[in-house]
Amino acid sequence: MEEGEDGRGDLRKPFLHTGSWYRMSSRQSSMMGSSQAIRDSSISVLACVLIVALGPIQFGFTCGYSSPTQSALTKDLNLTVSQFSLFGSLSNVGAMVGAVASGQISEYIGRKGSLMIAAIPNIIGWLCISFAKDYSFLYMGRLLEGFGVGIISYTVPVYIAEIAPQNLRGALGSVNQLSVTIGILLSYLLGLLVEWRFLAVLGILPCLILIPGLFFIPESPRWLAKMGMTDDFEASLQVLRGFDTDISVEVHEIKGSVASSSRRNAIRFQDLKSRRYWLPLMIGIGLLVFQQLSGINGVIFYSNNIFESAGISSSNAATVGVGVIQVIATAVATWLVDKTGRRILLLVSSSGMALSLVVVSVSFYLKESVSEDSTLFGILGILSVVGVVCLIISFSLGMGPIPWLIMSEILPIKIKGLAGSVATLFNWSFSWVITMTAPMLLTWSSGGTFTMYGVMCIFTVAFVAIWVPETKGKTLEEIQNSFR
């Protein structure tokens, strides 16, 4: 703690102050050895991204956990359908609380400190689930997991966007969602091999690796600049760009961006009336809300039940197949996002989701009037699975990774903490609604449920076409200045 101008202490310092090693290295790079890989800017940034990507893997593992464990968990603990639905959705409730805190935590103690704080409740939450004897420990563990995931879901895309060079920001930003899909796939695969208690123990591993990894990466240079830590800011940027790289132009741009607002000036809700603030906030909230209204979390959380309803006997295998496809499609999006642009991928993605949901809903509607012994019943089952697979592919190409990427790009640095918390809160609130209602809606009418999700995807197409700007190839400062 340091004394401020008004005599009061200032707590806004890096929670994990690991700057000394890379400040020394930038001055005495020969001590780091002759390895050119260490001095390469892409390798430096990529190493940071791979470490923080453990957070989204934890995120995905939490999302996917309920699908392979539903039958065994409900049987062992005598849970009703509504109790398991509540268990599945409580991670979203915890994430809402985490979302409210995420922006302010990351503003006060830095991006790395936020991830450290997020890792601890995740570990405790998984242990609670693993040792649960009744639903009370299940619920407590799920809430704690959700709290950590809520912080992770905001902090990781913001950190990646702030450290990445503009020509790699789209691809590196998409690693966030790619890691989520890898976490989901891991939970599906491991859920087939181990029982639900041991699967919960395995859920601890990403955060156990993340915690020590945070001590070996620099803090976000833009956050350090905002906090007025000039030496640490330049040292962080230097190691991210390479020790032999001239960073003077980028240093000047970042300093100019933060110069207009003192680090002691708090954003007020009245300031959000300005177009440069309300427009990016509205776009960020809109994309994250429509992402959830597509019903994707209902499909991911309860994919086993959906495939069983479609008449697929090996629903577990189908679920794993969907997880694999999701990872591959998201990897393709990671490659495409800096080539085609964010906006076109969002339009293609939301249009593809709408068409896929039409196919699924029509299949389920027709199955209600067809005998289960007929050939047509089997064909309709296959058609519904194809529709779900196309839905996952379409989502992964755009609506999965890009809303988080755009949110981290367009929010001005002055309001990023407050606005990011609000946008993340909206995302998790609607995620909770979808996750909580999906089992009941699917029981009521599978065709009707997918029809509602399809209508939301059509609205998404219109929203993207009217409001969402293209951010490819622009620095964060250029993007934020475009809203002035």
Image: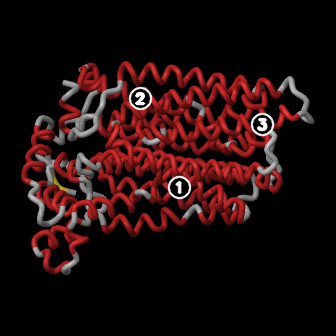
Q: Which mark is residue 381?
A: 3
**3 or 2: mark nearer the eye:** 3
Q: How far apart in space, not on screen, are marks 2 and 1 (Cα)? A: 25 Å
Q: How far apart in space, not on screen, are marks 1 and 3 (Cα)? A: 27 Å
| Residue 434 spot, x, y in % from top left | 61, 32
What quarter of the picture does the N terminus occupy?
bottom left
Indicate whether 133 appears above or below 222: below
* Amino acid type, label 2: Ile
Residue 305 located left or right of residue 215: right
| Residue 337 spot, x, y in % from top left | 36, 42
Residue 236 located left or right of residue 253: right
* Amino acid type, label 1: Ile
Indicate the quadrant where residue 402 lies.
top left
| Residue 400 spot, x, y in % from top left | 48, 40
Image point 18% across, 35% down: which residue? 478
Which of the two labelled residues, at mark 2 and mark 1, occupies the earlier sequence position? Answer: 1
**1 or 3: mark nearer the eye:** 3
**Pointer 2: what residue?**
285
**Label 2: which secondary element:** helix
- Labels 1 and 3 touching (C-beta < 8 A): no
Please state which of residues 140 and 68 is positioned toward the viewer in this rendering: 68
- The residue at the far front in this view is 375
Image point 59% across, 27% down: which residue? 355
Which of the two labelled residues, at mark 3 and mark 2, occupies the earlier sequence position? Answer: 2
